[in-house]
Image (cartoon, rainbow, N blue to C red):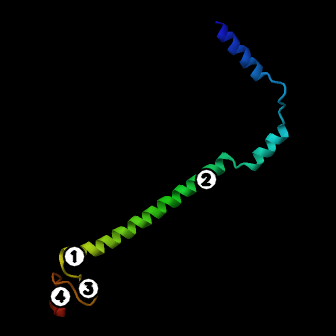
Amino acid sequence: MADVDKWLADAAKTTTDVGHEIDSNQIMRRLTVEAGPALSLARQDTRLVMLCAAMAAAAAMLLIAGSEKFGWKASGERPEALWLSTPPAASPFGLLVGA
C-alpha cells in the first residue's frame, strides 16, 4: 500500500506544479497558425479524389490497350469500316441498293 501512496503523492506533485504557467496568448497564436480540422479533411479528400482519378485513368488506358491488342489477335482479322451508305445485309433496303 505504501507504493500506491507514493504514486499518488508523485501524481499530485506533477499535476499541481506551479512552475508552469499557462500562456493563453501563445496557445491562441499556435491555434491560428495551424490548419483547422475541416481544412485538413478537405485536403485529405482532395488527395483521395486525385488518387482515384489517376488510378481510374491508368486502368482505362490498360483496358483500352489490352482490348485492342488482344481483341484483334483472338479473331485474327481487323474489323472493317462500316460506311453509312452501305446498308447491312439483313436490311430490306440492301436489296434496293444492291449491297
Name which residue type carries label 3: Leu
Which is more foreground, mark 2 or mark 4? Answer: 2
Q: Is residue 47 left or right of residue 18?
A: left
State the mark number for residue 82.
3
Asked if labels 3 and 2 touch by Cβ distance under 8 angstroms, the answer is no
Q: Of all residues shown, which one is farthest toward the top?
A: 1
Asked if labels 4 and 3 touch by Cβ distance under 8 angstroms, the answer is no
Q: Which residue is mark 4?
A: 94
Q: Earlier in the sequence, mark 3 or mark 1?
A: 1
Front one among 79 and 61: 61
Q: Secondary structure at mark 1?
A: helix
Mark 1, other Cα within 10 Å: few <14 / some 14–19 / many ≥20: few
Which is more foreground, mark 2 or mark 3? Answer: 2
Name which residue type carries label 2: Ala
Residue 42, above or below 74: above
Distance, label 1 to label 4, CA atoms, is 31 Å
- Position of residue 79 measured from the top left corner of the image (x, y, whole percent): 23, 82
Q: Is residue 20 left or right of residue 82?
A: right
Q: Which residue is mark 2?
A: 42
Q: Earlier in the sequence, mark 2 or mark 1?
A: 2
Name which residue type carries label 4: Gly
- Position of residue 72 measured from the top left corner of the image (x, y, whole percent): 23, 77
State the mark number for residue 73.
1
Which is more foreground, mark 2 or mark 1? Answer: 1
